[in-house]
Image (tube, helix red, strand yellow):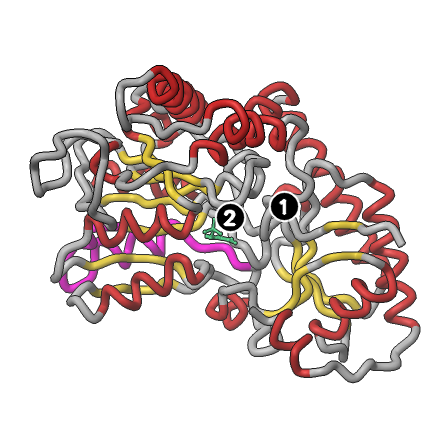
Amino acid sequence: MAIIYLDNAATSVPKAPGVGHAVAEVIDQLGASPGRGGHRLALEAGRLLLEIRESVADFIGSGDASRIVFTSGATEAINLALFGLLQPGDRVITSSMEHNAVLRPLHALQQRGIETVRVSADAVGRVSAEKIRAAAIQGPRRARMVVLTHAANVTGTIQPVEEVAEWCRREGILLLVDAAQSAGLLPINVETMGIDLLAVPGHKSLLGPSGTGFLYIRPGLQPTPLNYGGTGSDSASPLPPEELPERLESGTINLSGLAGLQAGLQYLQSRGLHEVRSHKTALLEMLLNGLKSLGGVRIYGPGEASGHAAAVSINLTGRDPAEVGFRLDTDYGICVRTGLHCAAEAHRTIGSFPDGTVRISPGLFNTAEDIENLLGALSEMSKNRTQVHLNPSVNAWSSM
Ligand SMILES: Cc1ncc(COP(=O)(O)O)c(C=O)c1O
């Protein structure tokens, strides 16, 4: 049975052509650690790292590559921004559509005296910029930071980041954008959009390997490190260096992974972001129209392709989403994600808590035929209503 992968919101599969080769080339032919030592291989590794940093900075519209700090993914980037900049007594505004990568660090920070206000999104998962603004400026004290996902991971709902960024800049409130579901899909320019902090995974729509990601930090901000250790510079000092990115990149960097990320970016640029977005929008249109004509399917989120980044959540009437996902996998070879998708609050908001949804997230390499096959499978499943009895391990896996 051919496998149809429709779980690109978790991580993209396959990666872009050239990614595997770029990773292997660093491992097989370079191998040295950038910034560690003055021998030729270390210098070459340093040059490669700088080139990758410049490509990434250019991709998000930053004129200063030193403001790109490489991380293991979006989670580490978000933790770095939150733990590195927030102080006891600070107030943070966020939304009910955030991933646990945002909500859990904020919860942990509450124990340190940092208050979080969560603004509820509407039934399609859209957050009102005005409601966030009101919460930020009308509380007992002005907010220090707004943390907002660019696109929700459960429904794919695109959030009004530009509008929020505009008044955050005017009011002097920091804006951290979680671009896990938008980078490589929606245009992002940190300078023209006025984004202070941008957390990006390398392994989703940027088509790079897992274990890669980065945080953009606007000039003038100086987070404290999450990790302390060797940076290859000023080794006699017990303190981390002041300069970015070294200050926030202790330890040996994942150079092979980052070379893969650069290959992913190059591929995306060769296809053009506009074409990438049009391809995914065409697949989403086909998916949404097909789902609407099936009957017995509840679609969560805006329901129009232009309102979704690249994920759509559904439920079949009267069916457990975990069972639907299990059937799609075992009977049809279709991989989707089911359950709560690390975002329980988002499900409470859209009315799918506690069972969650079946999330379908097409990627750049999916075809119209993949969507037709999925729609065919869902149609058969809604006609054949026999439920399979799931063993507990299947449920546990799918609701992670
Ligand atoms: C909206 C959102 N934020 C953060 C993350 C965490 O990303 P990473 O796996 O790169 O740490 C995800 C992952 O699914 C996500 O969807």
Disc 2 designates what residue? 151
Residues packed near mark 2 inside 10 Å, few (<14), some (14 to 19) or many (20 plus): many
Residue at far left of view: 237
Disc 1 designates what residue? 310
The kind of residue tagged 2 is: Ala
Answer left or right for 14 relative to 157. right
400 vs 117, nearest the viewer: 400
Q: Residue at x 45, y 29 (%)?
A: 31
Q: Do the residues bearing badges 1 and 2 touch, measured as CB atoms within 8 Å?
A: yes
Q: Residue at x 49, y 65 (%)?
A: 343
Give the vertical position of 106 relative to 128 (above or below): below
> Label 1 to label 2, Cα distance in Å?
9 Å
The kind of residue tagged 1 is: Ala
155 vs 203, nearest the viewer: 203
Answer left or right for 359 relative to 136. right
The reply to whether the magenta stretch includes residue 200 is: no
Give the vertical position of 36 relative to 371 (above or below): above
Residue 75: x %, y % from top left: 40, 52
Where is the N terminus found, in terms of image quarters? bottom right
State whether label 2 is within 8 Å of ligand 1: yes
What number is the disc on residue 39?
A: none
Residue 264: x %, y % from top left: 57, 29
Q: SS class of the residue under badge 2?
A: loop
Q: Which residues are magenta?
A: 125-145
- For marks 1 and 2, the one nearer the N-term is 2
Residue 376: x %, y % from top left: 90, 57
